[in-house]
């Protein structure tokens, strides 16, 4: 191997140093790129081969070559953006996005997301974020995740259907010192027929509200006994007259409310009572009344003014979506104008057996390959996958100080290799000057 080969040895050093400077420049150019992962370049030495193989004096290096450019997948720091659609992964995993044009699937740590004019959650390139849809379990009546990847879509102003009231609860204190009312119950009631009344609002199957006034009357008998009657305004029902009440439900023997004179606690009834009969009334909007119950559990009768302590019912009117939030487990939940919340989707994350085998596609996107293995899909917070940090973004993991030091070293290496070429040139000139 002659002196001339040293030209090529120095040239290989220039090539690798130049490529290293390109990698460093790429890292520094992406310091502000959301979710960017820095790269590191690695070199290998080259041996000069001969017809007799590599042995003895043939073990002379022939320079260097680029061996690999690896991506550093360490996590970057988080910055708060305040945007409700921005998310960051705290831990392992990649967001899964799909190109709607060709169906190609990509993976990214860039959580700067938005909603397009069709309601789809998209990344900066317009690719649709993937996740799992929540469906209503017909057996349990609860929302459950459907285990099939799909596009996340939120329709602004979408309607959450109403739910008719089937149960109501009233917790009361009925004055134990109240006088017994001897006047028989009649409609409309007069003050001498009852001791206390309280309203409860219910909803029909179409979401219309109806105020039911419940009247409580202390009755004669051994102990502290009360009866109740519920009325609805006639203007709410077909065939009725506004301002004229109609019967909605009542509690009599054996459903009297009886209280222990020693403790004031209710002894009967022990459970819910029939409140409205199915189909007993037709509301003005055409819907039929449905079977419902009322429960006076935990009511008491002390010698204190009668009052309503607590009131609940399980119906609600229709409502339109007002906002969507994302929690740490990737659940997209819509809040509705009727005060209800409904889970819509759960974001999907993907992990790989070999992150080093992912194909870098630019724009902080990656694709799987034979080297990376197939994507392992999962949900945030489950298994080895990280959780979601809402209203945050993951910054680039480029370490500026480290990159600057590497740049200085690379520059020196480039200068040294250039010097090798310069010295070999001088040696070749010396040979040419021999006479």
Image (cartoon, rainbow, N blue to C red):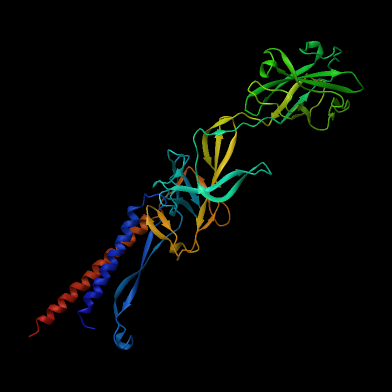
**Residue 155: x, y in percent?**
50, 37
Residue 91 in view here:
no
**Among the 4 quarters of the image, the one containing residue 112:** top left
**Among the 4 quarters of the image, the one containing residue 183:** top right
147 left or right of 413 in image: right
In which quadrant will I find the N terminus? bottom left
**Residue 314: x, y in percent?**
68, 32
**Residue 306: x, y in percent?**
77, 20
Foreground: 203 or 406? 203
Foreground: 181 or 281? 281
Q: Residue at x 46, y 55 (%)?
A: 75
**Residue 335: x, y in percent?**
55, 35
Q: Residue at x 12, y 80 (%)?
A: 430
As displayed, is residue 73 above or below residue 50?
above
As displayed, is residue 162 above or below residue 189?
below
As displayed, is residue 26 above or below residue 326?
below
Foreground: 386 or 432? 386
């Amino acid at each position: 191997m002659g002196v001339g080969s040293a030209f090529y040895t120095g040239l290989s050093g220039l090539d690798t140093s130049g490529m290293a400077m390109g990698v460093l420049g790429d890292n520094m150019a992406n310091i502000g790129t959301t979710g960017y992962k820095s790269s590191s370049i690695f070199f290998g030495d080259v041996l000069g081969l001969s017809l007799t193989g590599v042995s003895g004096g043939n073990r002379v290096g022939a320079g260097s070559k680029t061996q690999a450019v690896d991506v550093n997948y360490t996590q970057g720091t988080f910055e708060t953006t305040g945007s409700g659609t921005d998310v960051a992964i705290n831990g392992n995993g990649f967001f899964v996005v799909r190109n709607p044009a060709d169906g190609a699937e990509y993976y990214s740590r860039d959580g700067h997301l938005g909603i397009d004019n069709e309601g789809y959650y998209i990344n900066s390139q317009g690719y649709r974020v993937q996740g799992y849809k929540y469906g209503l379990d017909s057996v349990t009546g609860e929302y459950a995740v459907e285990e099939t990847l799909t596009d996340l879509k939120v329709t602004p102003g979408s309607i959450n259907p109403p739910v008719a009231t089937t149960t109501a609860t009233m917790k009361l204190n009925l004055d134990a010192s109240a006088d017994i009312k001897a006047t028989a119950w009649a409609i409309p009631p007069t003050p001498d027929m009852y001791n206390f009344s309280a309203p409860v609002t219910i909803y029909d199957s179409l979401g219309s509200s109806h105020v039911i006034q419940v009247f409580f009357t202390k009755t004669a008998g051994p102990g502290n006994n009360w009866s109740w009657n519920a009325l609805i305004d006639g203007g709410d029902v077909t065939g009725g007259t506004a301002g004229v009440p109609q019967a909605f439900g009542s509690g009599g023997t054996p459903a009297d409310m009886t209280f222990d004179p020693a403790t004031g606690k209710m002894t009967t009834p022990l459970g819910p009572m029939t409140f409205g009969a199915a189909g007993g009334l037709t509301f003005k909007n055409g819907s039929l009344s449905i079977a419902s119950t009322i429960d006076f559990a935990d009511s008491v009768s002390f010698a204190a003014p009668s009052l309503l302590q607590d009131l609940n019912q399980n119906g609600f009117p229709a409502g339109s979506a007002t906002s969507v939030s994302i929690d740490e487990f990737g659940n997209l939940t819509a809040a509705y104008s009727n005060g209800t919340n409904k889970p819509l989707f759960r974001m999907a994350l993907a992990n790989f057996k070999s992150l080093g085998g992912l194909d870098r596609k630019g724009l902080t996107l990656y694709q799987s390959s034979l080297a990376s293995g197939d994507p392992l899909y999962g949900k945030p917070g489950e298994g080895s996958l990280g959780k979601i940090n809402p209203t945050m973004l993951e910054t680039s993991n480029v370490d500026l100080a480290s990159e600057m030091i590497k740049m200085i070293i690379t520059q020196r290496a480039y200068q040294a290799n250039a010097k090798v070429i310069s010295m070999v040139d001088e040696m070749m000139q010396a040979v040419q000057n021999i006479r």
